[in-house]
Image (tube, helix red, strand yellow):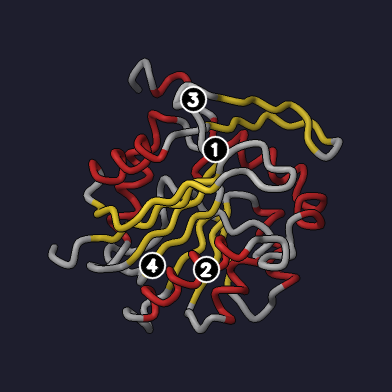
Amino acid sequence: MTAENAKHPDFLETTRASYDAIAPAYTEAFSDWPADSNALDRSLVAAFAELARELAPAPVADIGSGPGSITAHLHALGLPVFGVDISPRMVALARRAHPELRFHVGSMTSLDLPDETLGGIIALYSIIHVPDDHLLTTFAEFHRVLRPGAPLLLAFQSGDTEDHLHLTERFGREIALDYYWRTTDTVTDTLTKAGLQLQARILREPQDEEKRPRAFVLARRSETR
């Protein structure tokens, strides 16, 4: 383990335990997507779905699927989609709410999928818990499981690269959850290093009670191997 990696030896376990602790309250607060989203966010997800349908019937993965509402929305848009989340309790709640869909416990840093399996990956506000020294590994894993030409849509709260938030309480429960804010340049540069091709980037200004701009990055795995 390098000195840099030694800074975050347990981030997967602390993220899993934190979301297990807040899963019921989080699901109650954030289970009504797309009703709780705005028109721009919905249009970007719809654009991703249109691109992914070009590779159907290859499945699409919703990474960091949480309560499963975005997974269900993609299913309604006609995609063969399943959800992956690091929290077993979150997965159990998603399965209960959407019994017609598949949800699995897993980590985006090491997906239990064969190479070139997926027709798309969507990861909305889930890479924010990945430390900087694990981001390239995560994107390389996305590249590995995507089919040539398959799209990837990321969303994340944007901020200076050195911005970092550590929460010890949320929804009245004790947690140990880290949040990493990044610029679109940082994310797109790392995607390129992982072999993914940038298609578009959008920075949306904060709305309503949002505190930070929201960034959306659309990329694709190259058509050629």
Towards the viewer: 176 or 201: 201
Give whichever of discs 3 and 2 has the lower sequence position. Answer: 3
Give whichever of discs 3 and 1 has the lower sequence position. Answer: 3
- Please identify, in this view, whether the residue under mark 3 or under mark 4 is nearer the observer: 4
Residue behind mark 4: 120
Quarter of the figure with residue 171? top right
Dot 3 lies on which element?
loop
Quarter of the figure with residue 77? bottom right
Q: Position of residue 45 (x, y in %)?
A: 50, 66
Rounded to the nearest whole Å, what is the CA distance between mark 3 and mark 4? Answer: 28 Å
Rounded to the nearest whole Å, what is the CA distance between mark 3 and mark 2? Answer: 35 Å
Up the image or down, 3 lies above or below 83; here it is above
Residue shown at 13% from the left, 63% from the top:
225
Residue behind mark 1: 129
Towards the viewer: 65 or 103: 65
Q: In the image, what residue type sits under mark 3?
A: His
Residue behind mark 3: 8
Q: Which mark is residue 43?
A: 2
